[in-house]
């Protein structure tokens, strides 16, 4: 391999210094990370079948699921009846069955904490490095994996149980009040309540269709050809096998060539942009294989074909939102003039980065982070420095640059239908600029096409149901509510487009957090459900003349005191809410018992009414049968039969019987 060709315009000395810098600060920083660096991994929704919907962090609105969309902390996923979906977090595979609600409580480089409020989840945990934690919280327990293995959790809200199945590996489950239990391989236990009360258990449980479906997916991953060329922590490597070929290149080494039939296809041209925190503008590709090649590695053009260059297999690949460079007409921003319908509009244009070219994020990041996200050894540029380097390989190539209007870009519209050609003379004067500013417009977060499509939403009980967290990470609380309270900042809600109502209001209205019925909830508890004002994060001012709570506390520890007060207030609110729900459940039980008593009384009355006609018939039948005999004894022997009492004879001469009326039994 020729180093000068692989790292164009880079010297060996710069490369050596960069590698040494990454080696010194990259390894240790990966475990800790700087305070301002975003996580180096996300979750990918790589496959789903059936009605699946999602709600991004900070939004109460649901939309149809998007293939290849990165999912991160605070995002929620719902599989409706008959749906199945698969996600990957590094080498870990998550499979969801129908009627399953899953939320990402924490997702960073050290911790994966999921909240499973109902449904079935199968986990294939390939690796669990030291210092990392994998946890699944349910309404009954907190499941923590002790080692790699295959695990399944089933949450049944109808009977209030969680069934934990360990196919391989080992795990520990934690209940409320510090209770814990260990599970080994080929073991299955059902837990009721939050105190780890075992309801049932067995050894080597049989497989059901959901288990067999997950095993088939695991076998396909085990046989993946792409795993020979890239790390299994590169999310989306599994989809490369069926949609391209691996080839050897004398300059770049092993490359992957996709099977594309589009005439003018180029990287980052078939998909749309979405604003996803904390990274900002993120590329979401429409191709089924379109995750790994657009968030890791670089693209290179060999003749008329494009190939993906994964580069050296890194021990910890770092996710990037989009490995592109943006170009415009001035250093102050992106101001391409694109003709649409005869009129010119502001535009946004970008191009793929080539091997050896460093990616510059729009957010502040540490040097260690930049070294990990640019493993090729290319020189990096300080944060937000525009026009620092105009020597990118595909910056002036019309076949590589894609441009759309600024409105289409910010609204998450599909690029394939809205791309506009850019002339070579315009690209010659184009300069590298900073990416556009991220926005919280629902169209940019969800994707414009998804807001107008019908989609299911989870039931209110699945959204409000609490889950038990690990005692060491629950901040002193035994339970955690499935809301955005664990995320920094206030809950953000979708804003309506100007001049109209929310799109698809009949299917996905922008509604507040779902609350339980307020009929039997005390007013104080109802008030706590209301969203706090925007300045609710600031503590209320102390009235004049009021004595301070603790004069002995030094001023430097006042933030800690405020945090403890917030935790105490939060604990009080949780206890009050639990008491209110307990009162509501007691009232519901009393109503059910009263209704049951009424039904029993009605059944007894009906049975008594049904027995009364039978008793009357039993009393009337002996006199009727004895009346003809007594009449015969009293009459003379010579008396004719016709002289007998007519009321005891029918028209045929026989004794008359009491007719039974159907209405008497009722």
Image (cartoon, rainbow, N blue to C red):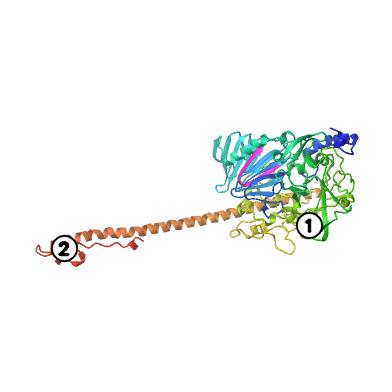
311 and 632: which is toward the camera = 311
Q: Quadrant of the N terminus?
A: top right
Find out whether residue 478 is within the magenta segment: no
Tell me the mark number nearer the camera, choosing from 2 and 1.
1
The image quadrant of residue 490 is: bottom right
Distance from the alpha carbon under mark 2 to that under mark 1:
109 Å
Main secondary-structure element of the magenta-colored stretch: strand
Q: Is residue 464 left or right of residue 428?
A: left
* Residue 311 visible in this rendered orientation of the protein: yes
Q: Is residue 425 left or right of residue 120?
A: right
Q: Is residue 587 left or right of residue 469?
A: left
x and y percentages locating residue 266 in the rendered image: 78, 46
Instruction: Name the disc covering residue 561, or none.
Output: none
182 and 364: which is toward the camera = 364
Find out whether residue 119 is within the magenta segment: yes
- Residue sitting at 22 percent across and 63 percent down? 656
The residue under label 1 is 407
Question: Crowdedness of circle 2 by 10 Å Cα count: few (<14), some, many (20+)?
Answer: few
Q: Quadrant of the C terminus?
A: bottom left
The residue under label 2 is 631
**Residue contact between numbered discs 2 and 1, judged by CB atoms under 8 Å:** no
Highlighted range, magenta: 112-124
x and y percentages locating residue 179 in the rendered image: 62, 40
Circle nearer the N terminus (2, 1): 1
* Residue 164 visible in this rendered orientation of the protein: no
């Amino acid at each position: 391999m020729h180093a000068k060709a692989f790292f164009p315009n880079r010297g060996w000395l710069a490369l050596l210094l960069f590698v040494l810098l990454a080696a010194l600060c990259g390894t240790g920083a990966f475990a800790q990370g700087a305070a301002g660096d975003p996580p180096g991994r996300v979750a990918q929704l790589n496959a789903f079948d059936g009605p699946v919907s999602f709600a991004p962090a900070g939004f109460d609105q649901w939309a149809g699921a998007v293939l290849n969309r990165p999912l991160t902390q605070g995002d929620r996923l719902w599989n409706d009846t008959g749906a199945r979906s698969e996600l990957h977090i590094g080498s870990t595979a998550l499979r969801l069955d129908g009627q399953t609600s899953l939320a990402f409580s924490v997702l960073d480089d050290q911790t994966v904490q999921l909240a499973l409020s109902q449904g079935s989840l199968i986990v294939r945990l390939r690796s669990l490095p030291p210092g990392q934690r994998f946890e699944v919280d349910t309404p009954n327990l907190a499941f923590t994996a002790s080692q790699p293995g295959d695990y399944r959790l089933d949450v049944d809200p109808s009977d209030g149980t969680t069934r934990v199945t360990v196919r391989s590996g080992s795990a520990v489950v934690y209940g409320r009040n510090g209770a814990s239990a260990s599970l080994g391989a080929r073991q299955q236990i059902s837990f009721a309540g939050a105190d780890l009360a075992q309801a049932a258990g067995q050894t080597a449980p049989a497989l059901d269709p959901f288990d067999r479906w997950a095993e088939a997916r695991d076998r396909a991953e085990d046989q993946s050809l792409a795993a020979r060329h890239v790390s299994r922590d590169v999310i989306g490597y599994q989809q490369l096998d069926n949609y391209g070929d691996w080839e050897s290149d004398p300059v770049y080494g092993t490359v992957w060539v996709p099977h594309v039939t589009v005439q003018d296809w180029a990287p980052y041209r078939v998909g749309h942009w979405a604003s996803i925190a904390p990274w900002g503008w993120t590329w979401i590709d429409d191709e089924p294989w379109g995750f790994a090649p657009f968030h890791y590695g670089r693209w290179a053009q060999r003749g008329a074909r494009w190939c993906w260059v994964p580069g050296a297999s890194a021990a910890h690949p770092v996710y990037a939102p989009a490995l592109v460079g943006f170009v415009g007409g001035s250093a102050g921003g992106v101001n391409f003039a694109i003709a649409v319908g005869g009129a010119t509009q502001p535009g946004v244009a970008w191009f793929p980065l080539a091997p050896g070219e460093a990616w510059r994020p729009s957010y502040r990041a540490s040097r260690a982070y930049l070294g990990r996200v640019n493993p090729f050894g290319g020189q990096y540029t300080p944060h937000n420095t525009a026009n620092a380097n105009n020597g990118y390989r595909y910056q002036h190539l019309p076949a590589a640059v894609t441009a759309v209007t600024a409105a289409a870009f910010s609204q998450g519209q599909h690029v394939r239908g809205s791309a506009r050609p850019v002339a070579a003379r315009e690209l010659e004067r184009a300069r590298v600029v900073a990416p556009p500013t991220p926005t919280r417009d629902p169209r940019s977060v969800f994707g414009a096409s998804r807001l107008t499509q019908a989609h299911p939403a989870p039931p209110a009980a699945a959204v409000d149901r609490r889950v038990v967290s690990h005692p060491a990470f629950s901040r002193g609380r035994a339970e955690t509510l499935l809301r955005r309270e664990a995320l920094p900042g206030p809950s953000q809600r979708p804003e309506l487009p100007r001049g109209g109502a929310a799109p698809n209001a009949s299917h996905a209205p922008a509604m507040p957090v779902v609350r339980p019925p307020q009929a039997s909830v005390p007013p104080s508890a109802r008030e706590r459900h209301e969203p706090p004002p925007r300045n609710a994060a600031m503590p209320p001012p102390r009235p004049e003349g009021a004595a301070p709570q603790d004069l002995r506390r030094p001023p430097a520890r006042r933030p800690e005191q405020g945090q403890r007060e917030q935790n105490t207030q939060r604990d009080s609110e949780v206890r009050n809410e639990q008491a209110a729900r307990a009162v509501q459940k007691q009232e519901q039980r009393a109503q059910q018992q009263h209704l049951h008593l009424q039904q029993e009384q009605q059944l007894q009355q009906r049975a008594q009414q049904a027995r009364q006609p039978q008793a009357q018939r039993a009393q009337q039948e002996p006199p009727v049968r004895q009346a003809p005999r007594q009449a015969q004894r009293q009459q003379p022997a010579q008396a004719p039969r016709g002289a007998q009492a007519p009321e005891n004879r029918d028209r045929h001469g026989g004794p008359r019987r009491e007719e039974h009326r159907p209405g008497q039994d009722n």
